[in-house]
Image (cartoon, rainbow, N blue to C red):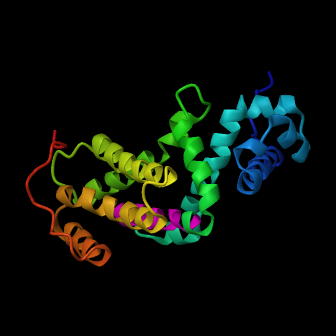
Amino acid sequence: MAVKRGPYASDLQRQRRSQILLNTRELLESEGIEGISMARIAKMSSVSTKTLYNIFVNREGLLLQAAANRLDELVASASIQLATPGIPRLLAITELAMMPFRDNPDFMKTVVAIVIAANENTPGAGERVGRVQMLAYDALVVARENDELKSGVDLQELSLIIAANQWGVALMWQQNMISLEQLIRQTNLNHVITLIPFCIGGRKQWLEKRMEMLHPAITPVSNQPIRLLS
């Protein structure tokens, strides 16, 4: 009995999918959302429109995966993989993720608009929109294993707060409510401020020193417990 293969199981299929996402992202960078159609991407990628729909379900699913593909590349980069696992790697990802905002702000405004617009009916939305939360949760798991967190911290809720803060600041920038420099500074600073009350020992001291470098005028965070302790 033949075994049914999963979607894009072969190297050739994975390469084709990567090329489709690359073509889509290049159009997003050069023309914005308006320049994207399934027929155009299919022609550029030398596949049928039916194949494109089979892979990504609809235009929204394709746009979301193309927009989020950049973050996946950053996470897989050598500099991130060399960073210390846990909270240091999470902050390193955040810093590196800010580079595209500085290098190509128009494209990143498009990316934020696509991700924010995704809903539960958009293919891949659960994974992609929650990518930052998953990265934060994984970092917190490592921090707990290393005894860097206070006892009883709810990792799920704390990771949600970290992700919400990041997307909230990005949305404010996308809506022209804050400047690019404010976006970069606040995104890096938010993670540190959020994490300090829940960390202990050397990791807390490390975060406090980092906060002083990012914003010397901020008063050290209180040791009073916050409602994320179960």
Region of the chain picked out in magenta, as a range: 85-100
Residue at x-position 72% and y-position 51%: 28
> At which x and y percent is residue 230?
16, 38
> At which x and y percent is residue 181?
45, 69
In the orientation shown, which residue stands out farthest toward the top?
1
Relative to 37, does residue 83 appear above or below in the rendering? Answer: below
Q: Main secondary structure of the magenta part?
A: helix
Quadrant location, the N terminus: top right
Relative to 125, does residue 95 appear above or below in the rendering? Answer: below
Count up the numbered dots. 0
Residue at x-position 24% and y-position 42%: 154
Viewer-proximal residue among 6 and 43: 43
Residue at x-position 41% and y-position 46%: 133
Relative to 220, does residue 35 appear above or below in the rendering? Answer: above
Residue at x-position 67% and y-position 34%: 60
Residue 73 location, quadrant = bottom right
> At which x and y percent is residue 150?
16, 54
In the orientation shown, which residue stands out farthest toward the front?
176
Q: Is residue 199 magenta?
A: no
Residue 216 location, quadrant = bottom left
**Residue 85 appears in the picture as rendered:** no
> At which x and y percent is residue 124?
59, 35
Q: Is residue 88 magenta?
A: yes
Would residue 86 be found to the left or right of residue 7 on screen? left
Viewer-proximal residue among 19 and 78: 19
Would residue 159 be found to the left or right of residue 150 on screen? right
Would residue 185 be found to the left or right of residue 175 on screen? left
**Residue 117 appears in the picture as rendered:** yes
